[in-house]
Amino acid sequence: MSEDPRPGGATGRSAKAPEDAYERRRPRFVRPQVLRNLTPEQRSEERTSTPLELFFDLCFVVAVAALARGLHDEPNLGGALRFLGLFIPVWWSWMIFTWYATGFDNDDVPYRVTLLAAMLSMLGLAASVGEVGVEPGAAVSFVLAYALMRVLMTGLYVRAWRHVPVSLRPFVVLYATGNALGAAVWLSSLLVPGPGRYAVWAVGLFVELLGPILAVRTLYNPRVSFHPRHIPERYGLFTIIVLGESVLAVAVGTADTNWEPSAVLTAAFGFVVAAYIWWLYFDHVGSSGIELGPRPAFYWGYGHFAVYAGIAAFGVGTQLAIEAAAEADVALAATTPAGGYDLGARLVLAGGVALYLAGIAFVDRVNEGVAGNRAILVRLATAALLAVLAILCASLPPPAFVALVTLAVLALTVLETVREDPSSSLGGT
């Protein structure tokens, strides 16, 4: 029996009418904000990222770069915790607009203006996120920019409420409510002094993360809320964005070292690691988990946080290694003591790769279940090995340490390539 496209008992004609109307109203400035994935036919059609979505992604390049600078300046436990904590709202801001677009993007003027306003807010957030916890006024700017994005998202869902079938309105209402409450909690944090403000931020994030979970539970078929090919493509593009930051770190780190031989060698190894990270994700991380049900879909989506944060940290670690290698070369030429390559810098590099491997292991556990346990254990074992290397290899110079990381990731990539046919993965679709 074919899937019933009639939410809440609506007729087949009424379920399809919004999409037909969508095609007829393309030249108009204002279009109904209809849900675009109601029928199996709509979910099987091709959907690709729009130019506006790609423009939207550029703003997150700036935000990730700002977070990376903060970790670069403070490569220790405090800096790592600050980096991971602030990475969550940046990543979540990208997530909520991406998932909204897969269901409701109608590309009319109000939608475009709303997204452009959200991009401006993200740039404001990026300008302040690097100073949060350092400059007193940065937290206020950060909260205002972040809350404004929540208000804009609330407005989009309120607008969509008018055009969705009655049976889908609880879904829209819960999403709008979660974003509105989240904005209110974040704004209220401005009244809380000191470290207590960060606890309020955590509450706000919890409210926002809970909203989609409750909303999807109201749907007769959760698949109507996303497009099964559009979402994996968007996640892949964000992976490329964060990888781009790693490649930029290689270039910037090398340019700032006057092309010292050890720095160039370290940079080359760092780029090779970035290439293996790309290879592993796009050839061996699938997207089948998002269609297994609401809970696997959330695990799949939320699990990518470790993927993105790990790649971004690895980029910072690569730059720190390049700089340490250059300092060692300069010190050797001047016959003066070198500054050394400390544990924090090694952990940022190796720990970033380890976090990435743990992330893709979790995502593929969602995709494959117990069938993928062997590959998952190999990834986790490699992640553990990298952490041990960071702790034990204090005497190694930066090029040698990065070379060890490269060998570990190379071995994993070879094992994955031998084990799995790439044509069955995300990169082969």
Image: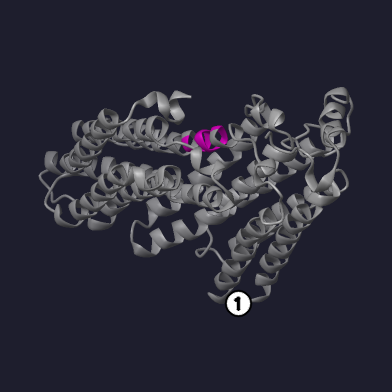
- Taking the image as shown, residue 89 lies to the left or right of residue 408, namely right
Q: In the structure shown, which secondary structural element does the residue marked by tag 1 occupy? A: loop
Question: Which image quadrant is residue 364 in?
Answer: top left
Residue visible at 40% across and 35% down?
Answer: 281
Q: Nearer the viewer, residue 300 or 63?
A: 300
Type of the residue with mark 1: Pro
- Specify start and end residues of the magenta stretch as a single range: 233-239
User: Does the magenta portion include 236?
Assistant: yes
Q: Nearer the viewer, residue 359 or 45?
A: 45
Overall secondary structure of the magenta stretch?
A: helix
Residue 372's x, y, as percent? 34, 43
Question: Which residue is under mark 1?
Answer: 193
User: Does the magenta portion include 146?
Assistant: no
- Taking the image as shown, residue 179 lies to the left or right of residue 49, namely right
- Taking the image as shown, residue 3 lies to the left or right of residue 403, namely right
Residue 95's x, y, as percent? 60, 47
Q: Is residue 400 visible?
A: yes
Residue 141's x, y, as percent? 65, 59
